[in-house]
């Protein structure tokens, strides 16, 4: 359920009567009709029920309603009807055979039914000028000799019978007060009241007997959490009377009614009491609830006690304050309970809801606990129900209006208890047969001559009567917050098609229509670190801006945001209300709260220069320059030998590179290779060439590639060739070269020649000796 929008019209100089009564030093003054947001109940709606086939229906004249119900065991079933005008009741079996027929306004009879499905037809045959009928009926297998068992008292159910029509209404408050005045009481716990077999067995197993009642101030706490969900808690401020022990107790309970069987935990609630688990016999559920016993005393009559339940705030949490008072002036707060749910709104509410949980307020009498039923032998006293409200900046206690005589949110019940409405939210309690009744007999408040109707922007209409020439000083709030994300802004006040500024003074001279001309504004929240425009207006960073409902917004974001020459942010997505858009411009019609996030991705520049072809992530390039996503995996592959021309090449022993891009990067692949030049050697004689601590023997022609910048050294060598009389010597003195380009190296040897003098001398000596011998 979304939080209801309450528009408060502050009307000064409008006092129908002065009520001097007060409670806790706050005046008692009935809340105006406008406070309740009264609306006619349509024929498709129904009021809440209690027993197996109980409901309150709205049936126009000469129309009918059909209720279908199932019987599981043969029994004599008792039927009770209570209508404002006579109707005709028919019950048919599944074969459309008529089994039962009665007519009248109050019917109390029985019918024997076997297991099966049945239809009950309720026909309003009246030609009355009323707009409909209020109908109550009960079908139950238990005897009604003692009346219908219910928690009787005074309650607001969110429905009202006004001017012979059925209305629904709602309101919220931070405080309920129940006043209990008992002059005398005699009762006993009835172990055989018409409840489920589970509870009857529970009575027998636990020997629940004796006498006692509970008088319960029950209300519903509605919470809107910070996370956007809604929660409901059932609050009970209880006066427990035990005549067997002559004691009375004051205690509180809190139940989690967010869902059926909802649980509580000690970690989620903080007060003087604690959470306990138990088995719900009536509904066959494992449940838990918070409880605390706050006060006990001897029971004596007369007994006068006020029970007070108040809602306040403890940091961001709702706090429930349970209190009591004996004098109506001073409140004793006996338990302050914090529900540890961060919340942006909380209040006790009355709202026209339906079973299993009703959003009602009630001051009712039932058994002393555990779903018990109490039979009232004798009682003399009154119950009064009040709630706190504000009007024109002042606080008032309003007596409960539009009252029923039973509650529906507690398991404890009673019977033989009659309630007589004596006005101003007060009932008299006397013994007698118990049946459901609508207590209040009131019309929508009217004064005189002319109708003044106020139409609010949520189509709520406030209507009242004022005498001619009445001066009304009307003030509407300039701003009405609907939620954290929307509000209404008052432009002006339209009175019978004429414009007035706020506040306005008008004189009632005829029927008057007052329209506060509000414009609904919705919040647009944009979370983006960079520049963007909204309808050509520039913005930067996070911004939350309200625009009128229906405004067409053209929003454009920067596609690329440069950080420097090497780093950019690129717009990947626009996230609009959790939907992704892969574009930089949006046009939206603002009809609700809208939130936009931008998803920018960091990109870094990758530059790769190379004198040869390479592959980047399996795509071939000669040079590459582009922005890549931060964290990109870069795989670079190239050949180990890369020829530039016939004389130059790059030798790349490590020809596979991998990087993860975490910043801008520039790579020159030449730095990962050795530039080599072709070196051609020629030597007629063998020579040794020293290259990188290695020797190469060159004899003739030899060519190889040598790294740029390498020093080579051709070692000195000498070769000598001799004959008997002559010799020739070839020698090379050695030379060093710095390789910085292709070179043709011809190793040229120097030549020396001469005579072998010794051999010549020897020959001369030999020749001389021969000549000497011969001659």
Image (spheres, helix red, strand yellow):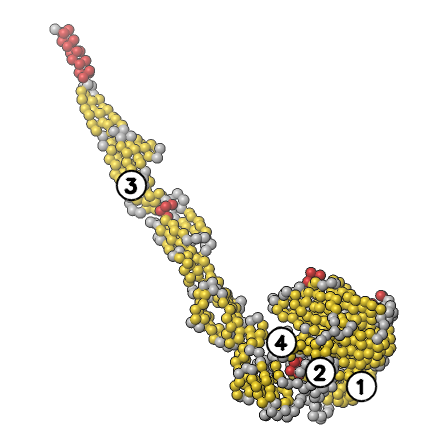
- Say which residue label 1 marks: 107
C-alpha separation, residue under disc 3 versus residue under disc 2: 114 Å
Residue 600 against residue 429 in the figure, above or below: above
Of 223 and 60, which appears nearest the observer? 223
Q: Quadrant of residue 753?
A: top left
- Say which residue label 3 marks: 740
C-alpha separation, residue under disc 3 versus residue under disc 1: 121 Å
Residue 133 against residue 295 in the figure, above or below: below
Image location (x, y in percent) of residue 328: 75, 74
Question: Which of pointers 4 and 1 lies earlier in the amino acid sequence?
Answer: 4
Label for residue 19? 2
Look at 74% across and 84% down and name the residue there. 440
Category of crowding for the residue at label 1, using alpha-carbon neighbours closer than 10 angstroms: few (below 14), some (14–19), many (at least 20): some
Question: Which of pointers 3 and 1 lies earlier in the amino acid sequence?
Answer: 1
Category of crowding for the residue at label 4, using alpha-carbon neighbours closer than 10 angstroms: few (below 14), some (14–19), many (at least 20): few
Label for residue 4? 4
**Going by the image, does 221 lie left or right of 192?**
left
Question: Which of pointers 3 and 2 lies earlier in the amino acid sequence?
Answer: 2
| Contact flag, marks 1 and 2 (Cβ < 8 Å) | no
Of 188 and 645, which appears nearest the observer? 188
Question: Which of pointers 3 and 4 lies earlier in the amino acid sequence?
Answer: 4
């Amino acid at each position: 359920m979304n939080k209801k929008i309450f528009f408060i019209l502050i009307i000064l100089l409008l006092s129908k009567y002065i009520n001097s009564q007060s409670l806790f030093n706050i005046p008692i003054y009935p809340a105006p009709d406008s406070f309740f947001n009264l609306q006619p109940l349509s024929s498709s709606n129904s009021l809440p029920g209690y027993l197996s086939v109980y409901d309150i229906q709205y049936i126009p004249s000469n129309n009918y309603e059909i209720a279908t119900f199932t019987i599981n065991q043969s029994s004599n079933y008792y039927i009770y009807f209570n209508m404002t005008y006579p109707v005709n009741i028919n019950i048919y079996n599944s074969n459309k055979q008529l089994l039962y027929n009665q007519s009248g306004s109050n019917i109390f009879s029985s019918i024997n039914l076997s297991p099966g499905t049945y239809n009950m037809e309720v026909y309003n045959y009246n030609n009355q000028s009323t707009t409909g009928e209020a109908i109550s009926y009960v079908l139950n297998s238990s005897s009604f000799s003692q009346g219908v068992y219910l928690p009787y008292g005074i309650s607001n159910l969110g429905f009202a019978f006004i001017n012979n029509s059925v209305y629904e209404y709602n309101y919220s408050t931070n405080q309920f007060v129940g006043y209990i005045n008992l002059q005398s009481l005699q009762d006993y716990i009835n172990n055989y009241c018409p409840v489920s077999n589970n509870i009857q067995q529970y009575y027998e197993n636990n020997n629940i007997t004796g006498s006692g009642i509970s008088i319960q101030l029950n209300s519903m706490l509605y919470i809107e959490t910070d996370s956007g969900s809604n929660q409901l808690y059932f609050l009970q401020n209880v006066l427990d009377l035990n005549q067997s022990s002559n004691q009375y107790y004051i205690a509180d309970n809190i139940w989690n009614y967010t869902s059926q069987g909802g649980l509580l935990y000690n970690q989620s609630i903080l007060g003087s009491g604690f959470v306990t688990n138990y088995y719900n016999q009536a509904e066959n559920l494992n449940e838990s609830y918070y409880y605390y016993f706050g006060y006990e005393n001897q029971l004596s009559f007369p007994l006068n006690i006020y029970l007070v339940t108040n809602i306040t705030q403890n940091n961001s949490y709702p706090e429930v304050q349970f209190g009591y008072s004996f004098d109506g002036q001073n409140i004793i707060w006996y338990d302050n309970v914090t529900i540890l749910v961060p919340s942006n709104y909380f209040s006790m509410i009355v709202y026209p809801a339906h079973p299993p949980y009703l959003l009602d307020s009630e001051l009712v009498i039932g058994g002393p606990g555990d779903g018990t039923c109490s039979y009232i032998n004798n009682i003399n006293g009154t119950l009064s129900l009040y709630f706190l409200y504000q009007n024109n900046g002042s606080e008032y206690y309003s007596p409960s209006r539009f009252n029923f005589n039973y509650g529906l949110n507690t398991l404890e019940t009673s019977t033989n208890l009659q309630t007589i409405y004596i006005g101003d939210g007060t009932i008299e309690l006397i013994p007698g047969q118990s049946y459901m009744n609508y207590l209040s007999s009131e019309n929508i408040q009217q004064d005189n001559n002319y109708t003044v109707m106020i139409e609010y922007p949520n189509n709520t209409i406030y209507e009242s009567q004022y005498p001619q020439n009445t001066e009304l000083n009307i003030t509407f709030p300039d701003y009405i917050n609907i939620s954290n994300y929307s509000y209404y802004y008052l432009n002006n006040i339209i009175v019978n098609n004429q414009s007035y500024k706020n506040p306005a003074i008008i004189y009632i001279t005829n029927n008057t229509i007052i329209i506060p001309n509000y414009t609904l504004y919705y919040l647009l929240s944009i979370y983006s670190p960079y520049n963007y425009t909204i309808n050509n207006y520039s913005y930067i960073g996070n911004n939350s801006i309200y625009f009128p409902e229906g405004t067409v917004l053209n929003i454009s974001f920067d596609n690329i945001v440069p950080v420097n020459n090497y780093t950019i942010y690129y717009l990947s997505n626009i996230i609009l209300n959790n939907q992704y858009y892969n574009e930089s411009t949006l046009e939206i019609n603002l009809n609700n709260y809208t939130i936009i996030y931008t998803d920018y991705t960091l990109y870094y520049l990758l530059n790769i220069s190379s004198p040869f072809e390479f592959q980047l992530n399996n795509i071939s390039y000669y040079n590459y320059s582009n922005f890549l996503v931060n964290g990109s995996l870069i795989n670079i592959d190239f050949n180990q030998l890369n020829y530039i021309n016939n004389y130059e090449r790059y030798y790349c022993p490590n020809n596979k590179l991998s990087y993860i891009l975490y910043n801008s990067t520039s790579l020159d692949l030449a730095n990962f290779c050795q530039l080599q030049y072709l070196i051609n050697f020629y030597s007629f004689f063998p020579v040794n060439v020293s290259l990188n601590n290695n020797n190469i023997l060159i004899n003739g022609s030899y060519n190889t590639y040598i790294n740029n910048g390498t020093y080579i050294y051709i070692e000195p060598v000498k070769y000598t060739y001799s004959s008997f009389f002559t010799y020739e010597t070839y020698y090379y003195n050695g030379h060093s070269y710095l390789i910085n380009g292709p070179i043709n190296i011809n190793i040229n040897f120097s030549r020396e020649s001469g005579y072998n003098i010794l051999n010549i001398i020897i020959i001369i000596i030999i020749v001389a000796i021969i000549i000497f011998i011969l001659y």
